[in-house]
Image (cartoon, rainbow, N blue to C red):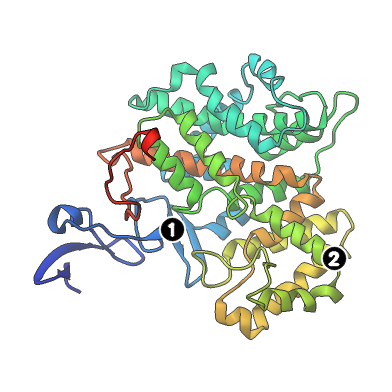
Amino acid sequence: MSDNAKIKIGNKEFDFPIKKGSVGPSVIDVSKLYFKTDHFTLDPGFTSTGSCESSITYIDGDKGQCYYRGYPMDTLAEKSNFLEIAYLLWYGELPTKIEWDEFSNAIKNHTMVHEQIRVFFNGFRRGAHPMAIMVACVAALSAFYPDSINIKDPEQRRISARRMVAKIPTLAAMAFKYSLGQPFVYPDNTLDYSENFMQMCFAVPAEKYKINKVFAKALDKIFILHADHEQNASTSTVRLAASSGANPFASISTGFTSLWGPSHGGANEAALNMLKEIGDVKNIPQYIKKAKDKTDPFKLMGFGHRVYKNYDPRAKVMQRTCHDVLNEIGNTDNKLLQVAKELEKIALNDEYFIEKKLYPNIDFYSGITLSAMGFPTAMFTVIFGLARTVGWLAHWKEMMIGNKMKIGRPRQLYTGPNPREFKELSKR
C-alpha cells in the first residue's frame, strides 16, 4: 500500500498521508486539505470521517466484535465487574490487587453528594424526567466541587473523574426517588457498586431492603456493556465540548444531553415500547409487513446498528442476562420476551433483514431486563448514562494528555443567499 493518497482537482494533484492504526482500516489524513486545495470535505453524519485518534475502544462492525483496551467486551462482561472496567478504561490496564483496593475504596469514599444538592432538587417540578434532572445536576457539580475543575492539573482531573464515577449513581437514584415522591436513600459503602445503586433506588426507610444478587449481577453486566462504544454521538459531544476547555463536569453533562435522544440512549425505551405495541406473537406478521413497507412510518426498534454489520456482541450477553432475570422472577412465559424471541428468529432468517443486515442489537433485550428488575422506562437512559460516564471520562482524559486537544470547529457547505444589501423598513 502506498504511504500517500492522491486527490486530483482540476489539473492539480495533491498528496495526503495514509495512517495505519494498530487494527482496523487505515485513514487518509486530510487535515491539510483546505490549506493545500482550498476545498473542504462534506460528510453528513461523519460516516467516513475520523475525528480523533484513540486507544480506548475498537469495534469491528463486520465481525460483530468490540474491545475495551484490547479485551473482548463480552468476555469482560462475563468475567469482570464494572468498577474494574472503569479502572481499565481510565488507566489502560486491569488493576493489580493493590491498585484495585485503592481504586474501589476511593470510589466508595466519594459516593455521597454535597448535602445542599438535596435543596437543588427541590427546584425541579415533581414530574420532571430523570434525564432532565441528570443533565442539570451533573453540570451543577462544578459549582459544588470547584476544587477539581482545573483541566491542566492531572491530580484534579483524577479527583473529578473519581467523583463522577462515585456520585453519578447517587444522583441517578435521587432523580428516580424524586420522581416517585419518596425520600432519598443515602449510599451504603459496604455494598458493591451495582448493589449500592439498587438499594438507593428501591429501598425505603420503613423497611429493610433485601438485595437480589441475580438482579445486581445483571445490572453490573448492563453497566459493562454500556461503558464505552467508540466515537458515538454522546462521546463525540463530550469531546467537542471538552475541546473548548470546559470543566469536566460540564463536559460530561453534554454526554447526558446527547444520550437523551431516542436514536441513541433512548433506543432501548423505544424498543420496549415497540414490543408492548406488538403485544403478542400472533401480531408479528402484520408488524413485519409494516416494517418492510417504505410508505409506512412504523420502524422496528432494536434492530441494526450504525457500526455493526453483524450480530451485536452485546446483544448475545444481554439475551442471556435477560433470561437470568426473568427466570429469577418466575416470568419465563413473559409475553414481551416471546415477542422478542420470535422477532429475533425472523431477523436472523428473513431475507429482508439479512440483506439489510438488521440484526438484533443490545437495545432489543436491555429494556425488557430493566423493566423486569423494576425500573420504569424513564430510567433506562439514565442507567445508560451512568454506565457510559466511565467511557466519556476516559475519552476526556485522552484529550487532556499530550498535544491532542484542539478545539473542534467543523466546516460547512453554505447554501444560503448571496451577499445582499440591507433595506430600511420603509423601503421593503
Relative image position of residue 45 (x, y in whole percent): 43, 58
* Whether residue 303 can be seen here: yes
- Residue matched to label 2: 279
Residue 94 visible here? no
Q: Which corner quadrant of the image does residue 137 belong to?
A: top right
* Mark with earlier residue (2, 1): 1
**Which residue in the protein does label 1 denote?**
45
Quadrant where the C terminus is found in the figure:
top left
Instruction: Give the residue at x 49% y 29%.
Output: 249
Q: How crowded is mark 1: few (under 14 residues within 10 Å), some or many (20 or more)?
A: few
- Left or right: residue 143 versus residue 336 is left
Q: Is residue 6 placed above or below 404 in the rendered structure?
A: below
Q: What kind of residue is marked 2?
A: Gly
Left or right: residue 388 versus residue 201 is: left
Asked if residue 276 lies left or right of residue 398, the reply is right
Query: Residue placed at 46% from the left, 25% from the top?
Result: 159
Point out residue 257 in the picture as x, y percentages from the top left corner.
55, 40
Circle 2/circle 1 CB separation < 8 Å = no
Residue drawn at the location 45% of the way across and 40% of the way down: 238
Which of the pair 7/147 is nearer the observer?
7
Q: Furthest-left residue in view?
A: 11
Using the numbered discs, state the Cα–Cα distance from disc 2 to disc 1 in whole angstroms: 34 Å
